[in-house]
Amino acid sequence: MTKQQTTELKGIALLLLLWHHLFYKSIGLYYDWHQIVNVSGMTCKCCVALFVMLSGYGLMVSCGKGLNLKTFFVKRFTKLYLNYWLIWLLFVPVGVLFFGRTFDVVYGDAVIPNMLLDFFGLLNCRMLYGYNATWWFYSCIILLYLAFPLLRWIRLKSKVAFYVVMVLALGLGMHPTHGYFLYPIKYYLFPFCLGMEMAVSGSKLRGVGLSDPMKFVLSFLFLALCVAARICTQRYVLMIDSLIAFFVIISYLSLSLKPEEGIVRKSLGFLGKHSFNIFLFHTFIFSLYFKEYTYSFGYPIAIFFILLLECLGISVFIEFLKHILGVNKLESFILKTVEG
């Protein structure tokens, strides 16, 4: 995958994310013919596995020429936390001051320790959800980033050993026990490793002697089978998401959309560039602060596109604000200081 293709796939993951969060609960606030919308909303949970898989792929590609641990961790965590804390400072005070979502309400008796853990994105390591339930994913991605250097070392040293790790990760996602520190990555260590493997062995997939249309037909068929399996079974659905995410990637790449500046690719690329911002704040808009307004449109397509347009507008403003505040310059300064 090129960098642009991964960004476009993040755009697809963002669309799945918004649909999932809007409609995975049957709450009686939108029109749903035979619960098709609700079922599709639950199935779109595969967006998490897709984001994770793309992360594993991107990290493996970006570190292909070598890995400096200090630079790696400073770069990744600086980007993670500067964006996270900015969204926190923009949205949390609004909830406290105007919507009655105070720290006591959210964090209960353990306000200080839980708030600090939430502020550093680690609250879900205690199997708890913080001010914004969607931020559980920060615990997941932080643990995966911490594990990446070791996983990369294993893959470069021994393919067999790495495959053993993948099998163990698959078993972790199917194990019934939940009470441990690795809970946030229980279902997502496997797709992360699969993304890493795709970065290493992707050329072999490209070399398969099939035309792109045939690759698309076959991958789309497997995608449809995985979606059907997820809908029809109640077991291991979050592990099936890894297969769905994999075939979403293969199906999209097999389309061979050209040119790169075409409207579809440009639109998905634009969404992908804003996916991180929107992931961080969209729950505030549609659920925590303006739930009645969001669902007042009734029809799922209208609800979805109104939320998407609102989120894009807010994200563009946030990017402008980051430019004014010099967030990107601060990020570059921190990285240069560490490297210097």
Image: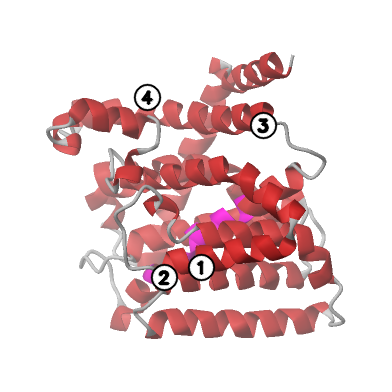
Kindly report the distance in space between the C-alpha atoms of the residues bearing marks 2 and 4. 37 Å
**Is disc 4 placed on a helix, strand or loop?**
helix
Q: Which residue is mark 2?
A: 174
Q: Give how far apart the Cα atoms at labels 1 and 4 are.
A: 37 Å
Image quarter for residue 295?
Answer: bottom left
Who's the residue at 42% across and 43% down the image?
139
In the image: residue 101, left or right of residue 62: left
CA gap, disc 2 and disc 3: 31 Å
Frontmost residue, 161 versus 287: 161
Residue type of the residue flagged with mark 1: Leu
Res. 21 image quadrant: bottom left
Q: Which residues are magenta?
A: 42-55
Disc number placed over residue 69 in the picture, else none:
3
Secondary structure at numbered mark 1: helix
Specify whether 148 is left or right of 37. right
Around disc 3, counting alpha carbons within 10 Å, would you say few (fewer than 14), some (14 to 19), or many (20 or more)? few
Above-or-below relation of 83 to 147: above
User: Is 250 displayed left or right of 95 in the figure?
Assistant: right
| Residue 147 placement (x, y as % from top left) | 56, 45
Total numbered badges shown on the rendered structure: 4
Q: Is residue 233 above or below residue 108?
A: below
Residue that carries the numbered disc 1 in the rendered image: 170
Question: Disc 4 to disc 3, how far (Cα)?
Answer: 29 Å
Labelled disc at residue 89: 4
Q: Position of residue 323 (x, y in %)?
A: 59, 21
Q: How far apart are the alpha carbons under marks 1 and 2?
A: 7 Å
- Where residue 168 appears, as percent x and y from the top left, is 52, 65
Residue name at image x 60 percent, y 53 percent: 10
Whether the residues at callouts 1 and 2 have beta carbons within 8 Å, the answer is yes
Kindly state the secondary structure of the residue where label 3 is placed: helix
Q: Quadrant of residue 259?
A: bottom right
